[in-house]
Amino acid sequence: MKRNYLLLSIMMVLLVWACTPKTAKETVVKEETPKVETPPKPEPEKESKCPTFDDAPDKDKAIENYVLCKDEIKRKNYDAALPLWEKVYATSPAADGRRNLVFMWGVEIYNDKFQKATTEAEKKQHVDRVMTLYDELAECYPKEKGFVIGRKAFDMYYNYPDFATQDEKYNMFKSSIDMEGMKSQPFVLNPFTALLRDQFDAKAISMEEAQKYSKMVMDILNNGLSNAKGRTLEDFKIVESYAPFRMEEFESVKGFYDCAYYKDKYLSEYEENKTDCDIMIDIYSTLRWGGCPEADAKLKEIISTYDNACREEVVVSPTETTPSGPSCSELLRSGDYQGAIDCMKERYEQTTDQDRKGRYAYSIASIYYSKFKQFSTARSWAEKAINHKPGWGKPYLLIGDMYASSGPLCGPGRGWDSQVVIWPAYDMWYKAKSDPETAGKAQKQINRYAQYLPEKSDGFMRSLKEGDPYRVNCWIQRNTTCRFKK
């Protein structure tokens, strides 16, 4: 019994000890972090103040017509799309308020009607409708006004050229670029570039205006090539194959570009060709033409290198002075290209030596092409050089280069019309290969331009195959042979 009492006492002591508060370790109760409700993202603000689906008497029906119209537009089934489009346009032309598709579909539909119209009255009616839709788009989406004006100009330039004057097209493109700046779309650049040059040649705009917008074109292009992506980047690459060439034509205008422009563009070519006498004297004269002073350190270096490495050709001999004093060579070096041409033409007429005549003719052709971009005149003088010096490769090489560089003149810079100019260029380069002096350069050009030949599929679409005869039009006007990319 005592034993049981002892056990009971021990258990009581243990129980009391277990109920005593402990200070060595406390139990920490972790509070649950309260849930924070993420507020729903606000609906994007509508960009248009024009009626949307929400404003339609029957929203569901308006959306249904929109979807059905979209499907017909994708199929280019414009006759079926028209009644659906009219219903959507009547109740909700701004769609959801954040896209201009309804307006652009209307442009597609009425452009199709224009293409099918048989009378001038019908055509004008459809053009007016397209232009009205563009105006209404700009009212509904004010932020897109610059883009819309660019689209109007683009359509007037390519689709409806007879319904606006050159001045009107030019001013529309200019307004678009002024509004959009670096955000200008690539589609405006090529036609605006062509108009810019045409307006300047017609003396419809000043040199200052042409200088301003030629710089803007190149700035927009370079910005696009650096920052655009996807399809837009591809479009800028198309512009790259056209606009810079047309802007380069302004080099024939004295004072259009400054010395810095010519240095940036041509000095690297000098650094890579310090043993090529033709290139060195050409670059030197180009920099002088651009207003670089004779005292310029780089010009001194170029002419020193030239004088040490090269022997002047007879056509630019310093002993051949003009009645006023300077030689043809001095005129050429100074960048007085017209004076050099006049000097050489005089020498050409005076001499009876066929070799000298050929060299004068070639030099004249080279200046007309590289400095004045007068292709037909340059070719005429190059052909005279060939007549005086049969088998001489330089004139053939020059004519080939003229043809190959005519892609932007004869087409948009890419595509069939711009590519087929390479065929007559090949004809000339193959002839230049017969002269050991130019064989290497001719083959280099042949290899270089092989990548730009048309695809066989493009020829197939036109029922043309390798070796077929073909007439290249534009300023070239020569018969040649079809050649396709291997």
Image (tube, rainbow, N blue to C red):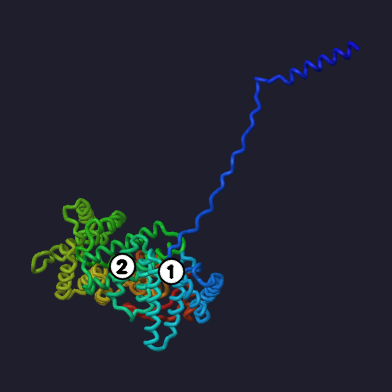
Of residue 120 and residue 191, the one placed in the foreground of this image is 120
Q: Is residue 167 left or right of residue 52?
A: left
Q: Residues within 10 Å of mark 2 (few under 14, many from 20)?
A: some
- Give the amino acid type for the residue marked by disc 1 in the picture: Cys
The extreme left residue here reads 324
Q: What residue sits 44% from the left and 72% below the top?
A: 103
Q: Please state which of residues 362 and 200 is positioned toward the viewer in this rendering.
A: 200
**Where residue 151 appears, x then y in whole percent?**
38, 71
Left/right placement of residue 197 relative to residue 154 reads left
Between the C-alphas of marks 1 and 2, the distance is 24 Å
Label 2 belongs to which residue?
175
Say which quarter of the image contains residue 433: bottom left
Residue corresponding to mark 1 = 50
State the image quarter where residue 394 is shown.
bottom left
Image point (34%, 61%), residue name: 220
| Quadrant (top left/top right/bottom left/bottom right) for the N terminus | top right
